[in-house]
Amino acid sequence: MNPVAIKVACSNCNLRELCMPLGLNKEELERIDDLVAVRRKVLRGTALFHNGETFKALYAIRTGFFKTTVTTEDGRDQVTGFQMAGEIIGLDGIVNDHHTCDAVALEDAEVCEMPFHRIEELSREVNSLQRHVHKIMSREIVREHGVMLLLGSMRAEERLAAFLLNLVQRLHARGFSQSELILRMTREEIGSYLGLKLETVSRTFSKFVDDQIVEVKQRHIRILDTEALKRIVNLQPCL
């Protein structure tokens, strides 16, 4: 997997508002354009980085989906997250200067590689970039807390409903439908992330279909009743 040496202009990217700070002036935009070293293509099933690998950069996902995994003591791969276009991946490596998980492409993907030493240098000069990096790190902490709550106290139906709502919300922020999505991950991978057996994931999907909450055609999901999903996870309609 070799980097593709194509200069990427953040200022012209349609995902800029998702992975870069807002309100930058022309000079700051030009400086951030220099932050991206290369654009890298990552083929489906291959790793962007591995557990234990030296941490050198953060990656803004330009296209495609990734999963992050860790290997358990008994040799199983445990899915710890799913990342999509417009999100930053690689934050796990900051604390100890090496990555603590594998990041694997679920489909052919493209990322913008941002050397971390350059991010640190530029953050000292562009305050909004520093705040944005802190915001991204904070969001990751909140996400991890949410997953802990999900795994610790929710029934299978609540876990899957929360997962679908979160996924469609993130996709909608990128201009996709609020009610239809194509799952890039397998049901087994969903189960690994949610702490559920494959059979439980399939059974819960079937119950949602029977209750006319969703339509399922292989990996294509159509949400028929968003409010029903919200009620399952005890969210109010206004949320």
Image (tube, rainbow, N blue to C red):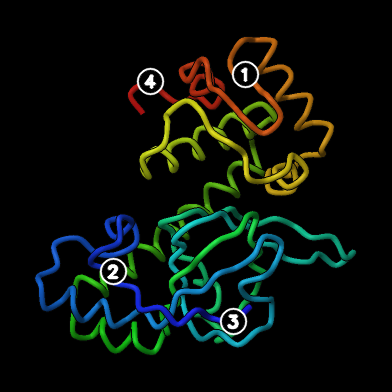
**Which residue is denoted by mark 2 in the rendering?**
10
> Which quadrant does the C terminus fall into?
top left
Which quadrant of the view contains residue 172? top left
Outermost residue to the top: 211
For label 3, the SS is loop
Q: Which mark is residue 111?
A: none
In the image, which is nearer the foreground, mark 3 or mark 1?
3
Q: CA distance from mark 1 to mark 2?
A: 38 Å
Using the image, determine if residue 29 lies above or below residue 118.
above
> Which quadrant does the N terminus fall into?
bottom right
Q: Which mark is residue 215?
A: 1
Using the image, determine if residue 189 lies above or below residue 115.
above
Q: Is residue 136 left or right of residue 91?
A: left
Residue at 59% across, 81% down: 2
Using the image, determine if residue 133 lies above or below residue 179.
below
Q: Position of residue 131 (x, y in %)?
A: 26, 69
Residues packed near mark 1 inside 10 Å, few (<14), some (14 to 19) or many (20 plus):
some
For label 2, the SS is helix
Q: CA distance from mark 3 to mark 2?
A: 21 Å
Residue type pointed to by label 4: Pro
**Which residue is denoted by mark 3 in the rendering?**
2
Residue type pointed to by label 1: Glu
Which quadrant of the view contains residue 54? bottom right
In this orientation, which residue lies closer to the viewer: 40 or 229?
Answer: 40
Q: CA distance from mark 1 to mark 4?
A: 21 Å
Q: CA distance from mark 2 to mark 4?
A: 36 Å
Q: Are marks 2 and 4 in contact (CB under 8 Å)?
A: no
